[in-house]
Image (cartoon, grey):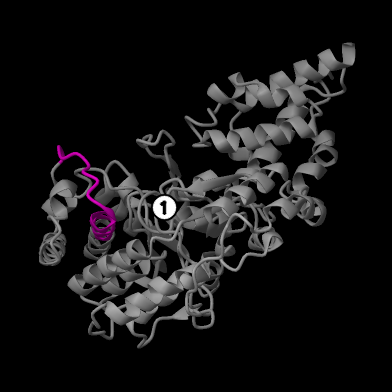
Amino acid sequence: MDSVFVMPGTVAAPRGGILCDLHNRYETVRETLSRIDKAAREMGLPNISTRLVEQNETSDRRGPEVQYLEIFAVSIATHHMLIAEGVKPVAIVGQSIGELWALAAAGHLSVEDAARLAVARSQVLTQQGWGGKMLAVGVDGRRAESLAELINHPHLVLACENAPRQSVISGPEALIEHVERVADALGWPSLQLDVPHPTHTPAMAQAARALRETAPRVPYGAGRWRVRSPWMGRDVGDDDPVDLVAGALTSRVRMLHTIRELHAAGADAFVECGEWPVVTKFVEASIPGVQCVVPLSESDPVEAVRALVADSTDVGTFRSRLAAPSRNGDGPVVRVSEPAPAGAVATLPVADLLTRTAVPAPAAPVSYVAPVSAPAPAAPAPPVAPVTVAPVAPVAVAPVAPVAVAPAPPAVVAAPAAVAPTVAPAASPSPAGLDYDTVLTELRTLYGDFLGYPPDLLGEDDGLEADLGVESLKQVALLGRVSDRFDLPDLRSDSSLLTAGTLRRIAETVVRARAEAAGR
């Protein structure tokens, strides 16, 4: 099995005690945590490992620098556990600041130098204090870029291409809010990311310059494993680590392309070195059927890794798993994907791909493309108020409207004709010409295409949220599609289908509503 380790960027603060078991089991983990603590103390920060090892410690939001180092500690500890249990990576990929974690895990940087550079990065971003936002949009990069270009502001750009239907736009807050309204009018799901340091935009040139000028230069080693840089679109060679981190601040990141390149080169498993399935959700949406594992989301991470090693040749051994609900209320789906049928369409609605992107740095700042040209000197951001907010409304609708229908996969439209002949003849059609089995089959196709699941795996009595991990934002988007497909506008406002939604309940509601409409 050729495994790729993926390191998350800025995610929610790790749970207290998350590293307790790994700390007790592995000397390499204890040593690494001790080195991170030492580096933190030298920079005037508290010990990082205490809350992560002691089960009863509560989260103390002590600023972005502490959180960055906590995420680093979790990522590097998971890496050491994987190596100790016999999982060797063919490559390591980092998402945004996670590229630093990848360099340290591969041996290119010392743990201490990676920690110092992470803190230096946070400090220059805080000092710049740019008022921007990042918006995840559930469409491909081409559409997201067109949406940003309609407003034509130099700092409003497509920042990240994470998956076939998940992109991130970065820019001034007022313009991001305008983009969000346009996306909503087009029926494109979107979600503002809770990140104090919006990056991957030319507006970060000042911070990038300051980092290059002030960050301590660090020794760079040969490394033990290959590190693939998503924003540069190539392997890291003898690049200066400070330049790597600074360059990523202003560059577009293309995780989708990096994932697919690695898979095409032979990688058949992706292992997330973090607490939540963040990067692996991009992977699953980009490559249907690929094997993904998130050890720390399992009840016994070590046993999960040992099972991975023991059964590495049998992908079918790893079935879909559901993690316990998070403190944010939407439990991450932790699964090892099964091969999808040929032609299956995988998508990742916005809320899911960024489920854990909170706090200090850009949410999904991954990298996978050739570096953009050197950042231009940062001039003060043009005033937001006079920007083209007023003219945008009419311009946005005209050029973009034609693609508004694109999010609905063609399979959904074609499903009725393809599926109808297979319906059991014994089923009695409703007055509207649709029986329960026909509606259920269409729903399975629609939901499967949207979620990236083979339709046959969607049980009619599976709870959409409790069993399948479909959080509320996605359910609202899906109900909208069902409403449009069956011409039932009132279905969008049926909250009972969100609180206890199953395909059976939705199908029964559709059949009943169509029958009532036909009887009027």
Residue 386 or residue 266, whichever sits in front: 386
Report the amino acid beneath label 1: Val
Q: Which residue lies furthest to the bottom in this view?
A: 238
The answer, for residue 389, to whether it is visible in the render is yes
283 horizontally vs 411: left or right: left
Residue 114 or residue 170, whichever sits in front: 170
Q: In the rendered image, which quarter contains the C terminus?
A: top right
In the rendered view, would you say 280 is above or below 366? above
Which residue does the numbered mark 1 point to in the structure image? 195
Q: Which image quarter: residue 33?
A: bottom left
x, y (%) of residue 166?
A: 58, 54
Q: Is 57 covered by the magenta stretch?
A: yes
Residue at the image point whose x is 27% and y is 78% from the top: 214
Q: Is 507 covered by the magenta stretch?
A: no
Q: Which image quarter: residue 225?
A: bottom left
Q: In the rendered image, which quarter contains the N terminus?
A: bottom left
x, y (%) of residue 491?
A: 71, 24
Q: What's drawn in magenta, residue-wise?
A: 55-72
43 horizontally vs 296: left or right: left
The answer, for residue 454, to whether it is visible in the render is no
The count of marks equals: 1
In the rendered view, would you say 141 is above or below 117? above
x, y (%) of residue 17?
A: 19, 44
Residue count near mark 1 (Cα–Cα under 10 Å), binned few <14, some 14–19, many ≥20: some
x, y (%) of residue 163?
A: 57, 58
- Judged from the image, the secondary structure of the residue bearing numbered disc 1 is loop
Residue at the image point whose x is 70% and y is 55% from the top: 343
Residue at the image point whose x is 80% and y is 20% from the top: 427
Residue at the image point whose x is 20% and y is 75% from the top: 110
